Image: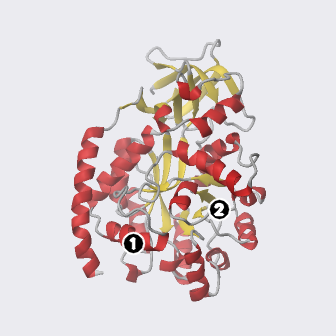
């Protein structure tokens, strides 16, 4: 069993007690953390252990991107509101996807995330077989779900998702999981929600869904069903602790109560919501109600960046600006939302550095002007720099399941130049097919 020793770093555990070691060491045996202690203590190490000098680096849990779409068309058709963006860009592009294009899109998406310190993605997309292969090769922890919609919308069916579960769930020694995924209420029905809930329960897996993302979605649901999206999901028994509901920008007080009552987790995606002009979610009220809220970037086609450090900054500043309250969404809270809250939403043993947890760890370089001045003995100061000053380029090392995927900003599992070339070519081929698909649809 391989051993990894991260020696002498500023260990920000994000555990229940808020443990912080100004100079600490973390030992990883296989895929789990086996020891955490002060740097002056002698850890139990093997003779062939890989030693990483973490001096001047923050050692912390990897980030969990709780709402993620593999994406191929970054910067393609910007400046459209959500509904028009979906009809003009997103749906035509994903309908034109083949296995090869989905694979390269995932390779690019997952690699961008690894470089920015993301160790887990909750990815809703199509052609999950291709995504699973990419996730296994890159080394990221991936929860995959299909884009299930009613059949007339020519996306994925419930059966597609069930088939993907049987083919890919548990791949890469459990690092890859499959959930059920619902696109959103405008492309669904109460019957489809019930069917997906029944299938997820039967298979023992969770669900990923967009809810209350835009006012146009809320109005569509009221017109078709006489209920707001979350009201309908609650009424049919869809919600629960195994559900991650993305966006939830326009929740009423009653819908917040429904989310809290059912133990449903929410992914807050502030950058995407801002870019698409959808509004600002009522996150302070959600947290006050006891809802578990994580953070996601959404997709680089409606965000243009998978950098979760940037998303964390948005997640704090937008609420302060909207409510004119500089005490809202403090850095240490936002950092926990981006790590342990996301892990808890997915039922993962990650998101915190504790003995026995899965070894999903990142090292963030602080020997730079971006982190100057640095009060090493004050973890609140570290959290402030991580949320308000850093971006993904500060990540030096990314470790998933005890395997070093990037060290010294050098990727170990993939060829980035090859990914860039092949993804650009896949995008051009897919765009060329889009006109054919539009005519058929």
The residue under label 2 is 281
Which residue is at 63% across, 25% downward? 36
Compared across the picture, whether 183 is left or right of 385 comes to: left
Q: What is the secondary structure assignment of the residue under circle 2?
A: loop
Is residue 68 in view from this perspective?
yes
Sequence-earlier tag: 1 or 2:
1
- Position of 134 relative to 289 (above/below): above
The residue under label 1 is 156
Is residue 172 in view from this perspective?
no
Q: What is the secondary structure assignment of the residue under circle 1?
A: loop
Dot 1 crowding, Cα within 10 Å, few <14, some 14–19, many 20+: many
Which residue is at 74% across, 53% downward? 324
The quarter of the displayed image where residue 220 is located:
bottom right
Residue 307 percent across, percent down from the top left: 48, 45
The CA span between labels 1 and 2 is: 28 Å
Which residue is at 51% across, 65% downward? 203
Q: Nearer the viewer, residue 304 or 26?
A: 304
Q: Nearer the viewer, residue 285 or 136?
A: 285
The quadrant of the rendering that contains the N terminus is top left
Residue 310 percent across, percent down from the top left: 54, 45
């Amino acid at each position: 069993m391989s051993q990894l020793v991260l020696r002498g770093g500023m260990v920000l555990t994000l555990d229940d007690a808020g443990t912080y070691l100004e100079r600490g060491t973390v030992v990883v045996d296989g895929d789990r953390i086996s020891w955490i202690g002060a740097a002056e203590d002698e850890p139990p190490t093997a003779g062939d252990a890989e030693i990483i000098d973490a001096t001047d680096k923050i050692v912390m849990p990897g980030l969990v991107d709780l709402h993620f779409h593999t994406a191929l068309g970054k910067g393609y058709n910007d400046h459209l509101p959500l509904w028009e963006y979906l009809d003009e860009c997103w749906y035509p592009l994903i309908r034109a996807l083949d296995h090869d294009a989905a694979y390269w899109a995932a390779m690019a998406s997952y690699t961008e995330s690894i470089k920015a310190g993301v160790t887990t993605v909750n990815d809703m997309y199509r052609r999950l077989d291709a995504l699973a292969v990419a996730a296994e090769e890159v080394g990221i922890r991936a929860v995959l779900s299909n884009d299930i919609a009613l059949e007339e919308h020519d996306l994925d069916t419930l059966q597609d998702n069930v088939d993907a579960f049987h083919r890919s769930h548990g791949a890469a020694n459990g690092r890859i999981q499959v959930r059920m995924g619902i696109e959103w209420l405008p492309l669904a029905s109460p019957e489809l929600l019930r069917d997906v809930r029944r299938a997820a329960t039967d298979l023992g897996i969770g669900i990923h869904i967009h809810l209350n993302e835009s006012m146009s979605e809320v109005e569509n649901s009221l017109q078709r069903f006489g209920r707001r999206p979350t009201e309908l999901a609650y009424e049919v028994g869809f919600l629960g602790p195994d559900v991650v509901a993305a966006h939830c920008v326009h929740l009423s007080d009653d819908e917040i109560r429904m989310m809290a009552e059912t133990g449903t987790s929410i992914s807050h995606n502030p950058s995407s919501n801002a870019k698409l002009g959808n509004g600002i979610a009522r996150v302070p009220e959600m947290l006050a109600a006891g809802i578990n809220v994580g953070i996601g970037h959404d997709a680089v086609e409606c965000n243009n960046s998978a950098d979760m450090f940037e998303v964390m900054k948005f997640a704090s500043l937008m609420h302060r600006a909207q409510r004119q309250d500089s005490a809202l969404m403090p850095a240490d809270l936002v950092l926990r939302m981006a790590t342990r809250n996301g892990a808890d939403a997915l039922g993962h043993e990650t998101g915190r550095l504790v003995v026995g947890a899965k070894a999903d760890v990142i090292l963030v370089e602080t020997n730079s002007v971006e982190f100057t001045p640095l009060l090493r003995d004050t973890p609140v100061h570290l959290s402030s720099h991580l949320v308000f000053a850093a971006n993904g380029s500060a990540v030096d090392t990314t470790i998933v399941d005890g395997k070093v995927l990037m060290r010294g900003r050098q990727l170990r599992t993939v060829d980035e130049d090859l990914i860039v070339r092949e993804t650009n070519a896949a995008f051009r081929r897919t765009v060329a097919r889009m006109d054919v698909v539009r005519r058929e649809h």
